Amino acid sequence: MAKARLGFLDKDEIERVYGTALRILEEVGVKIGSEEVTRVLAASGARTSDDGERMFFSEDLVKWALKAAPKSVLLAGTDASHDITIPSEERRMYVANGGEGVSLVNMLTDERRPTRTEDLRDFAILVDELPQVDFFWPMVGALEQPSEIKEVVEFKTSLEWSSKHIQSGAMTAQQARKMLDMAGPLVDGGENLARRPIFSAVQCPISPLSFERGLIEAQVAFSRAGIPIVAMSASVAGLTSPVTISGTVAQTTAENLASLIVTQAAKEGAPFIFSSDSSPGDLKSGSIDYGALETSLFRAAAGQVGEYLRLPKMVAGIGLENLSVAIGNIWEGVAYVANQSLIPSDLGSGLGGTDQAVGASLEQLVLDAWVWDAAKEFARDFDFGEGAISFDTIKAAGLDGNFLAKRHTSLRFRGESVATRIPCAALSSRLEASSRKAAITDAREEALRILGEAHEPKLDSTLSEEIDRIMRA
């Protein structure tokens, strides 16, 4: 089977990126902001600079970590029917909503306000109800909560209202241990989390080539407990990494490999996911530009490197963002998302985000899910076997000029064109006139309909009280 994929690096170019990453780790090194983690790395063979500020990793240490890391990772749901194993046998991409927006946006009126705990609950309910969304990111921050407990409140809310795998993270080792304690009762004890990790942790390197103390100490705590680590390097080309795609991908590869070594030094065989959220920077404003035309190329190149390293990978970003107000129907949105479906990645995220991921919108999440349902068909399997090509059919039609009446056509037409299976892709639907904002209006009505129904927490009262007790402690 042939599968459509976006890739533009040849083998020599991928090996040049990898070779440069090795040289960065051995000659430039990375800054580790934790003495505890520095000791863990030194015990595994890393070299410390004379001033103690940087750690250096040899090629042998990198190869050891790559060999030790699992080639397959389970992302379990609290409901086992939502379990995800990556890479999947079908080579499909699993997607999540976006994460940690700080404003709730009404896309129809452009009204916005700071987000609260109940907003996070609503997004968790929506994700649980939308079959197009495979796992859950805490979509917005519980900004009314004290900073000391904000992350654990968000984590508890996610556990309470989502039965799908949760991808979260911690700012400190103390938070990480609290999250492990909170998740333990859901799998009959913390020792079972390594067997069924119902959450994974996005622990970001800080570009360029730096690991903040709280984040890296939390990563070590998670790794020792068997929680999958997502090393999402969010370099901004021209600002926190080289302005070129090639230079940025080399740097993010080095950051991922350093994060991999930390994970394996904490616990050999701990699950790890290669990740990049890099994109060009707007050099006039100093901000990230997820909508840049080249963003998909940054992601595709990172995906190709992840495949070369034989690591599970999360490099795809998916969603219409503010373009949603300009389209009238689902099909108009597919053109913006189709290339994202072709990124060589096992995981993607971003549904529901607005304003360069600063905001989030209920209706945006629903519309993104609808559009993704059609756009992901670009990356389906295409049969290029002899039966699909069918020389005999071409020979027969070459004589009578009629393909429509052939058995080959009647047996295969539904599998070859999405227009036969997805209403928004049909010619009649594409020709229908639609007004601006019609699609986002329909999506808002659907979001409000779902949230207007009765929904019960996913945890029974005993588990909920146990988690509350752990939080109070």
Image (cartoon, helix red, strand yellow):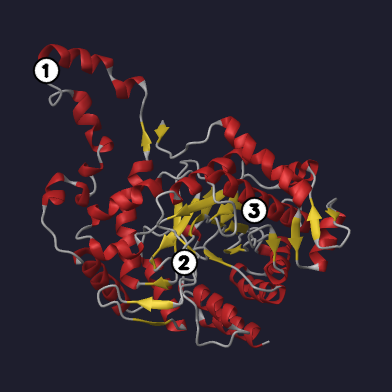
In the image, residue 66 above or below residue 452: above
Residue drawn at the location 55% of the way across and 78% of the way down: 156
Identified by mark 1, the residue type is Gly
Judging by the rendered image, the residue that carries numbered circle 1 is 401
Which circle's residue, 3 or 1, is located before the other in the chain?
Answer: 3
- Image spot of residue 129 (x, y percent): 36, 67
Judging by the rendered image, the residue that carries numbered circle 3 is 272
SS class of the residue under badge 1? Answer: loop
Q: Is residue 179 left or right of residue 282?
A: right
Q: Specify whether residue 208 is in view.
A: yes
Judging by the rendered image, the residue that carries numbered circle 2 is 285
Q: Are marks 3 and 1 in contact (CB under 8 Å)?
A: no
- Image spot of residue 254 (x, y percent): 67, 49
The Cα atoms of the two marked residues, 3 and 2, are separated by 34 Å
- Image spot of residue 147 (x, y percent): 60, 84
SS class of the residue under badge 3? Answer: strand
In the image, residue 330 above or below residue 144: above
Residue drawn at the location 19% of the way across and 24% of the way down: 407
Identified by mark 3, the residue type is Phe
Q: Is residue 18 left or right of residue 449?
A: right
Which circle's residue, 2 or 1, is located before the other in the chain?
Answer: 2
Label 3 CA crowd tier, 10 Å (few <14, some 14–19, many 20+)? many
Q: Specify whether residue 225 is in view.
A: no
Q: Are marks 2 and 1 in contact (CB under 8 Å)?
A: no
Q: Quadrant of residue 305?
A: top right
Front tag of 3 and 2: 2
- Image spot of residue 102 (x, y percent): 46, 77
